Image: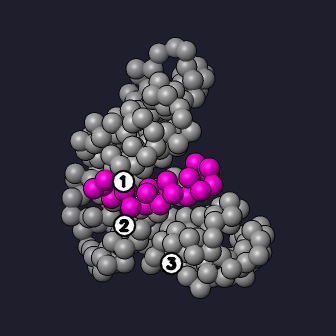
């Protein structure tokens, strides 16, 4: 770890890592680099305020922490155990740190979910809490929090696609590609994970983010109806035979 840190000190990440103190751990390094990324995205968001997608993508930083907090509450971990995995710089920059701390301090996951009422995550994490109660699988919080973020991103891009395709002030040619990869990857992985965990077909359909992109809804529905995870993967192989192994 010390050798890695020394090598990074001659890169643009030097300032972000300057306050790290021994003993060095992978977790400390990750949090420091995430803190730098949070600040870079926040500065970009302020500079390009007219592009809503940049604001919505910032929610992915909030979502990262929220998933960790909710899974910790679901698994009965203490505040002290949970806070080691968090930095909350992303929340601090947009005035959400206090709310995240309240959720982290909640007596249980139900109270934590209730505290998030009124946020863009609430409807989805209520569904995640119901799925967790039924199955005991805490990773449903990962899926449903990502669903909230990517649904907003997909809908915003689809409704504002002309803004990105016609803009002359910035290079936006790759924005559609970024959104497509994120949404398609989420949909495919979520279907496979939900099938692996035995979620009913209708509930799996509710997990889909629309509008879809290169992996159309029809293929995702066939995946959901497949008898096994391996059969579901074969549906992807039919449209991308050389890319899925």
Please indicate whether residue 107 sits to the left or right of residue 202 in the image.
Answer: left
Please indicate whether residue 14 sits to the left or right of residue 1 in the image.
Answer: left
* Whole-percent x, y for residue 217 in the image: 55, 82
Label pair 1/3, CB-CB below 8 angstroms = no
Q: Judging from the image, what secondary structure is the residue with disc 2 in?
A: helix
In magenta, the rendered stretch is 117-139
* Whole-percent x, y for residue 193 in the image: 65, 61
Query: What residue is rendered at 45% in x and 68% in y?
Result: 179
For residue 213, the mark is 3
Vertical side of 54 occupied by 7: above or below: above
Instruction: Please say whether residue 177 is visible from this viewpoint.
Output: no
Q: Judging from the image, what secondary structure is the residue with disc 1 in?
A: helix
The quarter of the picture where residue 135 lies is bottom right
Of the residues under marks 2 and 1, which one precedes in the sequence? 1
Q: How is the image coloured?
A: one colour
Query: What residue is rendered at 62% in x and 51% in y?
Result: 137
Which quadrant holds the C terminus? Answer: bottom right
Q: Mark 2 highlights which residue?
A: 152
Which quadrant holds the N terminus? Answer: top right
Density class for disc 3 (Cα within 10 Å; few <14, some 14-19, many ≥20) is some
User: Dominant secondary structure of the magenta stretch?
Assistant: helix
Q: CA distance from mark 3 to mark 2?
A: 15 Å
Q: Mark 1 highlights which residue?
A: 59
Label pair 2/1, CB-CB below 8 angstroms = yes
């Amino acid at each position: 770890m010390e050798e890695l840190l020394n090598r990074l000190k001659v890169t643009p990440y030097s300032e972000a890592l300057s306050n790290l103190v021994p003993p060095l751990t992978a977790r400390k390094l990750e949090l420091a680099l995430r803190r730098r990324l949070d600040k870079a995205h926040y500065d970009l968001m302020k500079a390009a305020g007219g592009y809503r997608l940049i604001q919505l993508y910032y929610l992915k930083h909030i979502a990262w922490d929220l998933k960790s907090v909710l899974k910790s509450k679901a698994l009965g971990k203490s505040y002290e155990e949970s806070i080691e995995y968090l930095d909350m710089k992303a929340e601090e920059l947009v005035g959400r740190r206090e709310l995240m701390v309240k959720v982290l301090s909640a007596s249980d996951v139900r109270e934590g979910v209730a505290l998030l009422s009124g946020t863009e995550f609430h409807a989805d994490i209520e569904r995640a809490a119901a799925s967790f109660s039924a199955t005991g699988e805490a990773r449903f919080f990962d899926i449903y929090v990502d669903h909230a973020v990517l649904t907003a991103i997909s809908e915003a891009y689809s409704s504002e696609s002309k803004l990105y395709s016609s803009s002359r002030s910035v290079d936006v040619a790759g924005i559609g590609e970024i959104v497509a990869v994120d949404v398609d990857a989420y949909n495919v992985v979520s279907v496979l994970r939900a099938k692996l965990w035995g979620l009913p077909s209708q509930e799996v359909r509710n997990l889909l983010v629309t509008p879809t992109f290169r992996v159309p809804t029809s293929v995702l529905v066939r995946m959901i109806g497949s008898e096994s995870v391996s059969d579901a993967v074969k549906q992807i192989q039919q449209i991308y035979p050389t890319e899925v192994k």
